[in-house]
Image (tube, grey):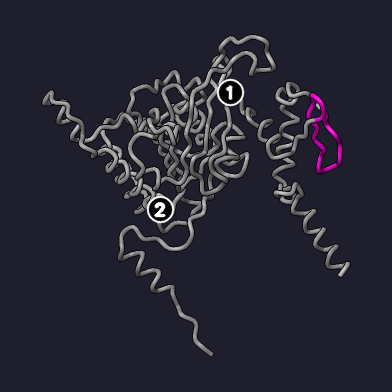
């Protein structure tokens, strides 16, 4: 009988002798909600999860599209609620303490470290120093004893290169000659390798610009494609006007807030290129349920009957028949559908059957020979 190969010594030696190498799998164990159920689902495949630690996530969009609201507001608050320490790097000098506190963010030093940064090199040095100390302190400790940390960079688009600074000092602004895309790519690639084995994540915002390509009209994300390839999740955002008729079926066109259109361009946990419109009224903030009705209708959970929409409970067979307005305003009903949808035996297939029904059908075919 062939003797089994003992890989334990090799595993120990290779991780000690070669920097940047780790063994085993690094599946996410901790997730941070974006503050919207539907966006969470489009990113992670779960209404509750959102963005994972151990990965790099980028939210890119035009000015005023809600990037900072989601990343520096909602996600920082939700991370803190889970006991995750947040390092918030502000390159736009726009994250005022009063604004953060209004969104429920704790600005106490034991919960948040806010750093003003201007250069990509500053961000790289901060992450490198932090992760070097973190690894030395916690690498050999059990995962449950390692503190959880979330880096938030708002934003990548405002970060400068040394060339930018030198040219400004000389008063000779020629541009950085393509150095910024390379620097951003290097930042993300190095960060991905450093944080992967730990419950440490990075969320960054970035800017977009209008496309000049008639065959690819979607807005382009600034900074080149390199760092997008290295990121685990990329969400592209557009700003729309949130009008009275969008909320509770109003009859006017008054602008009451922002409708953030979020397209998940890249995700390793769900199907990409799905879109949700998130409602962010000026007076009450983000609607956590916005987008659920449209998602349920799209995947066939809600079927149109006249001017109303029907749902049949998979738990007790009870029928619910309501107008669109009632569905959007009845949050308990939406959450009931959401909870039933996430049950293990309720996975929608292309033919509209659940996995449980398919298994039963296959068993019947076997019984019938």
Mark toward the start of the polypeptide (1 vs 2): 2
How many residues crowd mark 2 within 10 Å: few (<14), some (14–19), many (20+)? some
Could you tell me which residue is drawn at 65 percent across and 17 percent down? 247
Q: Which residue is mark 1?
A: 279
Cα–Cα gap, marks 1 and 2:
41 Å
Quarter-wise, where is residue 197 in the image? bottom left
Left or right of 217, for residue 182 = left
Up the image or down, 267 lies above or below 87; here it is below
Residue 318 lies in magenta, yes or no?
Answer: yes
Left or right of 20, for residue 174 = left
Quarter-wise, where is residue 23 in the image? bottom left
Could you tell me which residue is drawn at 58 percent across and 41 percent down? 49
**Closer to the camera, 364 or 147?**
364
What's the magenta region? 305-321
Q: Is residue 111 visible?
A: no
**Closer to the camera, 162 or 87?**
162
Nearer the viewer's eye, disc 1 or disc 2?
Answer: 1
Could you tell me which residue is drawn at 41 percent across and 21 percent down? 97
Q: Is residue 157 visible?
A: yes
> The N terminus is located in which quarter?
bottom right
How many residues crowd mark 1 within 10 Å: few (<14), some (14–19), many (20+)? many
Q: Which residue is mark 2?
A: 138
Residue 127: % across, % down: 33, 43
């Amino acid at each position: 009988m062939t003797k089994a190969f003992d890989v334990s010594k090799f595993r120990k030696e290779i991780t000690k002798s070669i920097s940047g190498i780790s063994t085993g799998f690094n599946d996410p164990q901790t997730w941070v909600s974006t503050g919207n159920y539907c966006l969470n689902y489009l990113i992670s495949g779960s209404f509750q999860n959102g963005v994972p630690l151990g990965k790099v996530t980028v939210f890119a969009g035009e000015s005023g599209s809600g990037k900072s609201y989601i990343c520096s507001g909602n996600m920082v608050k939700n991370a803190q609620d889970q006991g995750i320490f947040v390092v918030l790097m502000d390159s736009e000098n726009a994250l005022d303490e009063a604004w953060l506190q209004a969104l429920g963010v704790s600005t106490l030093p034991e919960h948040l470290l806010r750093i003003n940064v201007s250069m990509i090199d500053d961000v790289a040095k901060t992450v490198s120093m932090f992760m070097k100390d973190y690894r030395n302190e916690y690498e050999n400790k059990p995962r449950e004893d390692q503190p959880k940390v979330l880096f938030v960079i708002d934003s990548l688009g405002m970060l400068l290169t040394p060339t930018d600074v030198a040219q400004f000092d000389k008063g000779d602004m020629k541009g950085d000659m393509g150095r910024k895309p390379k620097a951003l790519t290097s930042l993300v690639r190095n960060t991905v390798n450093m944080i992967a084995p730990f419950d440490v994540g990075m969320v960054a915002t970035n800017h977009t610009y209008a496309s000049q390509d008639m065959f690819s009209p979607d807005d382009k994300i600034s900074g080149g494609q390199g760092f997008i390839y290295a990121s685990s999740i990329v969400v592209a955002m557009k700003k729309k006007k949130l009008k009275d008729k969008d909320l509770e079926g109003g009859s006017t066109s008054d602008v009451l807030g922002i409708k953030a259109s979020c397209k998940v361009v890249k995700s390793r946990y769900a199907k990409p290129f799905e879109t949700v419109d998130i409602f962010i009224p000026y007076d009450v903030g983000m609607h956590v349920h916005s987008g659920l009705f449209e998602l349920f209708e799209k995947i066939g959970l809600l079927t149109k009957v006249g001017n109303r929409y029907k749902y049949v409970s998979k738990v007790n067979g009870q029928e619910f028949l309501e107008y669109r307005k009632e569905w959007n305003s009845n949050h308990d009903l939406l959450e009931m559908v959401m909870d039933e949808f996430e049950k293990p035996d309720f996975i929608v297939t292309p033919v509209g059957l659940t996995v449980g029904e398919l298994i039963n059908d296959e068993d019947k075919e076997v019984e019938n020979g």
